[in-house]
Amino acid sequence: MILFLVFSIAFGWFISWWLQEPIILYVVIIIALIQSFTSFWWSDKTILYFSHAKPIKKEDNPELYNLVENLCLTAGLPLPKIYVMLERQPNAFATGRDKNHASIAVTAGLLEKLERSELEGVIAHELSHIGNKDILLQSVIVVLVSVIALLSHFFLRLSFFTPMRSRRGSRDSSGIIFFIFGIAAAILAPLAASLLHLAISRKREFLADASAALLTRYPEGLARALEKISLDPSPLPVANNSTAHLYIINPLRSQEAKNWLTNLFSTHPPIKERVRRLREL
């Protein structure tokens, strides 16, 4: 997060220096500080709110509560808050800043369509995200990518109001080169940040799958759950591009990657690869 703040401030300084507007640097610093603070303290509450997830108590679903409690005891984790989304698509995600401030959200479709061993595998996967500290990592990465994209878009829009001018306002060759460099950086920075986000998301999914198999001692349960969830055609309207990476399987039902290029821009590893690795365990 410190590196993120340094990068944001440096980018803001570049924009303000290029356009000779010091106020831009101050605005960027304020945005970066607010985004960092809110992402750490309130990102989980924001995600749960926009996912329409409702908290439940033990008496609402004793079987689910007991399952989560037993897995938490095995994993050595405190019991997270449990939420349910009234959606038909079977899916789940975990969020929060640490194991003591974590939440798990499952859809009604997940509870209805999976067998107990399969549901146990999914819950173990989400608890593994909590134990592996993925929930905080993903929140920070999402903010990093979104702010870099925001600043880049801001710079690109402003650049067209002052085209090909150097810092002194002349149209010399150095000004043109600097302008081209600035445009290229503004385009490539969010792309590079997004690719980093996607690569980390895929690696953490593989790690959570392996950790869940270790936790339940039954990899086949999670493997079957992944197959069932991936084949279910039900939509998940509360999901969007900003939160899709949090779910155990991409809720937007985009076509599974079939080559290295499409896989490069996917937040989740291919289901067949995840299932293959689980069954090899």
Image (spheres, rainbow, N blue to C red):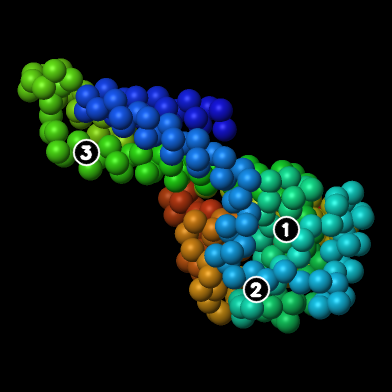
- Which residue occupies 85% across, 52% down? 78
In the picture of the structure, the residue carrying the numbered disc 2 is 85
Residue 225 or residue 75, whichever sits in front: 75
On the image, the x and y values in percent for residue 194 come to 45, 44
Is residue 100 found left or right of 46 in the rendered image? right
Neighbour tally class for label 2: few under 14, some 14-19, many 20 plus, Cα within 10 Å? many
Q: CA distance from mark 1 to mark 2?
A: 13 Å
- Please provide percent x and percent y for residue 88: 62, 80
The quarter holding residue 114 reads: bottom right
Q: Label 3, on which residue?
A: 158
Q: Secondary structure at mark 3?
A: helix
Does dot 2 land on a helix, a strand or a loop? strand
Amino acid type shown at disc 2: Met
Which secondary structure, mark 1?
A: strand
| Residue at x 18%, y 20% (from the top left corner) | 167
Q: Residues within 10 Å of mark 1 (few under 14, many from 20)?
A: many
Q: Earlier in the sequence, mark 3 or mark 1?
A: 1
Q: Is residue 192 above or below residue 207?
A: above
Residue carrying label 1: 103
